[in-house]
Image (tube, rainbow, N blue to C red):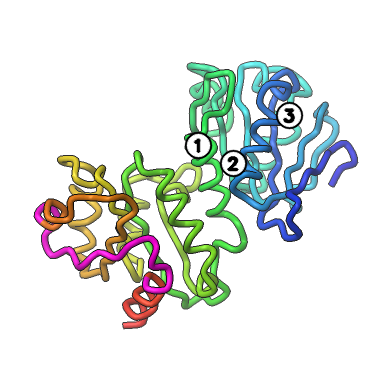
Amino acid sequence: MDPNYTCIKNSKNNCTVRILISMHPNDRYTFLEPLIRGIFKYIDAAVYYSPFPSDDSVPDMDEIDLMIVGVTEKYITWHNSGFVSEAMPAIKKQIPIFPIMLEAHISNLFNTRVGKLHYIENTADVISEENLIQICEHINNISKEHYPSSDNAPSIFISYRKQDAPELQRLVQLLNAHPERNNISLWYDTELNPGDNYKQTIIDRLKSCSLFLMLVTPNILEPNNYVMRDEYPLALKEKKRIVPIVMQKTDLNKLYELFPELPKCITSTQTDAIFSKIKTDAAD
């Protein structure tokens, strides 16, 4: 990596992913340190950044797995902000980009320059915990440990409500900690790539999965939600193996009423049972 770049790692030995954070120098004073602390709270990572990015100095993109971009008008329009020297080369190399809109109404200008990317908005003075969870979910998805060593490994589609993002993160952490984890490929919608057709990608992933893993909380009982209306019926139509996992106490009588043909639920504390079920069903 270019000597102008600083690298900070977790105290743990193995870093699962290498992240470059790119934002205007003025924004680094407010957002950089809490963003790095938040990432380290959930992820074993190596984080790179340049205190004073220069359009004449380009980082080695071969050493980067993911770029997080703090987007403001100054970042896009000013020289030596990191936009030209960091974001544009990453896009050219097809490095996954995670944009955070730090100002309101800036996404159109950003997308005009780079193309339409999925992004989150964070116009407050601090990075919210909800946004940190979304960022870390995305990091988990592109982490090398996210993908199994075998091309024939079962593929698990995790279906969940957006309100349950913290429970999704908890479930993913439980699955990642299990010794059988490397034999299983996980997919959930935060793995959508820049420019993907959101709905069609979900349909394609669901149709190709080996197992449909449905995250159960009281939110799943709300009328006409996306899981109930679209994902679960498609899983039934495609005759997918369905495993409901209870992450919060939920009215199961109502659950079975609203989700016809739903198999018996298992709980998030039954980690061995979860993988036993995954292995048994995915092997059929």
Q: Nearer the viewer, residue 248 or 142?
A: 248
Report how far apart the C-alphas of labels 1 and 2 lie in the structure: 8 Å
Q: Residues within 10 Å of mark 2 (few under 14, many from 20)?
A: many
> Which residue is nearer to you in this view: 62 or 242?
242
Q: Which residue is mark 2?
A: 97
Kindly identify the residue that appears in the image at 76 percent across and 33 percent down: 85
Tell me whether circle 1 and circle 3 mark residues in contact (CB < 8 Å).
no
Name which residue type carries label 3: Gly
Name the residue beneath numbered marker 3: 82
Q: Residues within 10 Å of mark 1 (few under 14, many from 20)?
A: some
- Give the mark, 1 or 2, whose residue is nearer the N terminus: 2
- Asked whether residue 232 is drawn in magenta, I would say no
Residue at 43 percent across and 46 percent down: it is 196
x, y percent for residue 118: 48, 37
215 is higher (above) or lower (below) than 2: below
Q: State which quarter of the image contains the C terminus.
A: bottom left
In the rendered image of this protein, does residue 140 appear above or below residue 82? below
- The crowding category of the residue bearing disc 3, from other C-alpha atoms within 10 Å (few below 14, some 14 to 19, many at least 20), is many
Q: Which mark is residue 281?
A: none
Q: Residue at x 64, y 47 (%)?
A: 66
Q: Is residue 236 left or right of residue 64?
A: left
Residue type, label 1: Leu
Instruction: Assess whether mark 2 and mark 1 are in contact (beta carbons under 8 angstroms).
Output: yes
Q: Which stretch appears magenta?
A: 257-273
The answer for how far apart the CA atoms under marks 2 and 3 are is 14 Å
Please state which of residues 102 and 9 is positioned toward the viewer in this rendering.
Answer: 9
